[in-house]
Image (cartoon, rainbow, N blue to C red):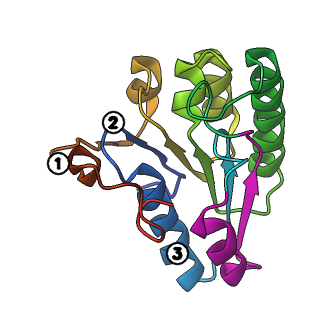
Amino acid sequence: MKNDGLVIVYTGKGKGKTTAALGIALRATGYGKKSCMIQFIKGSWHYGEMDSSKRLEPEFEMIAVGKGFVGIIDDKTSKEVHKEIAREAIKISNEKIQSGNYDIVILDEINYAVNLELISVDDVLNIIKSKPSKVDLVLTGNYAKDEVIDVADLVTEMREIKHPFQKGIKAKKGIDF
């Protein structure tokens, strides 16, 4: 059996896609493997993994590129600016994947960036096709395209069954962000 890197997709409308990817990074760090997470959307808010990821350095690097969630809550950034930032995230992703410095690269919310038309599905497929064989690649975000699912080795769909928000409970520090 070959020791080629896997393409892993965490998608679906349920909670836990980024958390599952961070679980891989945590496990990999335990084995001395190097991993990097590039965040395509979440960049402008403060959330727990921004601080906890520093505790995993130098084995884990997190780069928040996005300007926050697109088109919701307090987003005042134009769609064109979000597109420019997403293109920058693609460039950074390719550099990290090709650098030879990482065993695992996580592209957080990349599927959502495609769904929002900030980048194209071809951008994602080109990343997958050009990755070195030893690199494991993890793609998160809801709305994963069929073309990405078809080329992936592992696809997990998170499905919401029940959520505290339905009872009016707001996002909780340490659980949701």
Q: Quick one: label 1 or label 3, which is nearer the N terminus?
A: 3
Q: What is the x, y in percent for residue 16?
A: 37, 54
- Residue topped by disc 1: 162
Amino acid at pointer 2: Gly
Element under disc 3: helix
Quadrant in the rendering for residue 88: top right
Q: Residue 19 appears at what percent x and percent y?
A: 44, 60
Q: Does residue 23 appear anywhere in the picture?
A: yes
Residue in the image at 73% along x and 47% along y = 44
| Magenta-drawn stretch contains 167 | no
Quadrant holding the N terminus: bottom left
Which residue position is annotated with label 2? 12
Q: Amino acid at mark 3?
A: Leu
Please give the name of the residue rendered at 54% of the width and 84% of the height, measured from the top-left corner.
Answer: 30
Marks 2/3 in contact by CB < 8 Å: the verdict is: no
> Can residue 134 be seen by looking at this rendering?
no
Q: Residue 137, percent across and down?
A: 57, 48
In the structure shown, which secondary structural element does the residue marked by tag 2 occupy? loop
**Label 3: few (<14), some or many (≥20) within 10 Å?**
some
The residue where tag 3 is placed is 26
Relative side of 85 to 112, left or right? right
Label 2 to label 3: alpha-carbon separation? 22 Å
